[in-house]
Image (spheres, helix red, strand yellow):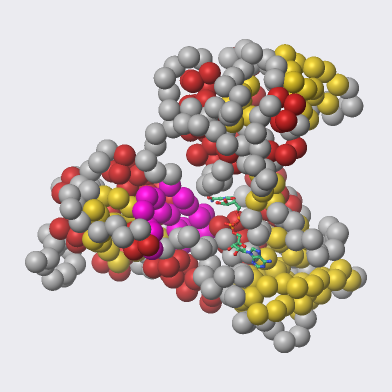
């Protein structure tokens, strides 16, 4: 993978590591290309804009233009990273796309934005040896995620990163020969400007709806660039559909591909609808943070009568044997019928484990369904079963006073 153990001390060969990453990406994108061919899908490379409700004009990479007629169309134009206007134009100031290029390992890296992308990119570069500073406007990392789940991640990274500056923002930056000089303002702002070798901006993404000349097709686009759709992913023009980041939050690949299925099926005349109850979120950090359905904060804000079952991984044999008992599994239940309405997991492989909670919600499972499903021992997946048992008051792997 590009990690070398020469004279006992591990070192990182970024060229080799990038090569490995590119091989993986090529396999996936090449596979898509090959499957498109097998399915007789023509792929045209270029930038498309609508000409009218049945034509797009495509400018190819060679500058040549062509017009393509369509009976139906699915817009999947995605989003782009939000830019901070006061930052100078400098190759050392990058977004997540630039971060994934893996062009060397900066000594000191500033990440602007402590959302999912910021925390994931911080993880990557911390692992490669960069000294990391994260600056986040709000009082919590990854706002929207349950604070109970973010805490173990924050605890782990705050020991490893140089600084995590919450409730703070960048107000000015200057590109100099020796580095990027950055001025901060806010609760935890350093009094002096700081110098970084690279700055990665991850302050959100904005939809590409305004870049398509959609008005020529009569497709509505909001002021912010989103394209509104109905439950079949149809825009206001019934033969034009839209999916993914361009139709709204959450901007997640698995939401987009699900919507793609719905749109393609609806376009072919099937009665398909987007009727998924929940969309899971995962931050691929270490530990991973994953959640699905109602969060405790949302339940409180919306006056939902809920109960919860929480299982600390310190009581999981598998987590202990992995040396990673810093995790937590938490399930929320509807107090009236004990059905599971949400869940969150922080810990190793949380992103894989959350699918069971998503399935339980989709199937309308209750705490007994989950708690009485025999889970293999010793696994991390047991923590989902145990959390349901904690809620029911039947758990034996942890002492919890019985529910009245
Ligand atoms: P985000 O909105 O999740 O987080 C941006 C963060 O930056 C927020 O916490 C915000 O408070 C902060 N911020 C904004 N302006 C700031 C400023 N001037 N100074 C300091 N902090 C500032 O956006 P993101 O992390 O860039 O991600 C964009 C989208 O991509 C999200 O919808 C995310 O879910 C999606 N995404 C998800 C994954 C994943 O699920 N693993 C991976 C990549 C992208």
Percent position (x, y) of residue 129?
A: 65, 67
Query: Is residue 205 visible to the viewer in this orientation of the structure?
Result: yes
Name the foreground residue: 351 vs 214: 214
- Residue 41 image-quadrant placement: top right
- Can you see residue 20? no
Q: Is 332 covered by the magenta stretch?
A: no
**154 or 173, nearer to the observer:** 173
Q: Give the quarter of the image for residue 170.
A: bottom right
* Image quadrant in which the C terminus is located: bottom left
Q: Residue at x 71, y 31 (%)?
A: 214
**Looking at the picture, does residue 186 appear above or below residue 15?**
below
Query: Residue at the spot x=48%, y=20% of the render?
Result: 265
**Residue 393 falls left or right of residue 205:** left
| Rendering coords of residue 361 (x, y %) | 30, 44
Instruction: Say left or right for 66 vs 335.
Output: right
Q: Give residue 66's position: percent from left, percent from top.
A: 82, 18
Would you place residue 73 above or below residue 85 in this image?
A: above
Residue at horizontal 56 percent and vertical 57 percent from the top: 116
Residue in view at x 45 percent, y 60 percent: 145
The residues colored magenta run 280-298
Q: Is residue 132 above or below residue 395?
A: below
The answer to which quarter of the image holds residue 38 is top right
Task: Answer with the quadrant where ligand 1 appears in the image.
Answer: bottom right
Q: Which is nearer the eye, 338 or 154?
A: 338
As drawn, the residue found furthest toward the bottom would be 191
């Amino acid at each position: 993978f590009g990690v070398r153990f020469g004279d006992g001390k591990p070192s990182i060969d970024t060229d080799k590591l990038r090569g490995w990453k590119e091989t993986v990406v090529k396999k996936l994108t090449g596979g898509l290309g090959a499957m498109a061919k097998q399915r007789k899908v023509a792929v045209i490379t270029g930038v498309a804009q609508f000409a009218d409700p049945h034509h797009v004009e495509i400018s190819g990479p060679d500058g040549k233009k062509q017009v393509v007629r369509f009976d139906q169309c699915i817009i999947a134009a995605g989003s782009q990273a939000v830019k901070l206007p006061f930052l100078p134009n400098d190759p050392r100031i990058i977004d997540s796309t630039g971060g994934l290029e893996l062009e060397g390992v900066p000594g000191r890296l500033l990440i602007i934005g402590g959302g999912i992308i910021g925390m994931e990119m911080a993880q990557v570069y911390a692992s490669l040896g960069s000294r990391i500073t994260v600056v986040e406007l709000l009082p919590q990392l990854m706002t929207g995620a349950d604070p109970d789940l973010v805490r173990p991640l924050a605890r782990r990274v705050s020991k490893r990163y140089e600084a995590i500056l919450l409730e703070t923002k960048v107000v000015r930056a200057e590109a100099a020969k020796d580095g990027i000089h950055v001025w901060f303002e806010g609760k935890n702002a350093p009094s002096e400007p700081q110098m970084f070798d690279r700055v990665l901006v991850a302050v959100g993404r904005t939809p590409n709806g305004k870049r398509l000349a959609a008005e020529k097709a009569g497709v509505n686009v909001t002021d912010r660039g989103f394209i509104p759709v109905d439950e079949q992913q149809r825009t206001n023009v019934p033969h034009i559909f839209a999916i993914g980041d361009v139709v709204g939050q959450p901007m997640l690949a698995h939401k987009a591909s699900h919507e793609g299925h719905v749109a393609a099926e609806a376009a072919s005349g099937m009665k398909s609808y987007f009727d998924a109850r929940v969309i899971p979120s995962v931050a691929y950090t270490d530990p991973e943070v994953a959640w699905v359905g109602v969060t405790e904060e949302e339940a409180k804000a919306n006056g939902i009568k809920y109960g919860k079952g929480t299982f600390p991984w310190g009581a999981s044999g598998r987590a202990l044997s992995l040396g990673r008992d810093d995790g937590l599994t938490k399930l929320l239940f509807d107090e009236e019928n004990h059905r599971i309405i949400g869940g969150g997991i922080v810990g190793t492989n949380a992103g894989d484990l959350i699918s069971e909670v998503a399935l339980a919600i989709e199937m309308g499972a209750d705490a007994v369904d989950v708690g009485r499903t025999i889970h293999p021992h010793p696994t991390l997946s047991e923590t989902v079963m145990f959390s349901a048992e904690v809620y029911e008051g039947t758990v034996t792997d942890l002492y919890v006073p019985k529910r009245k």
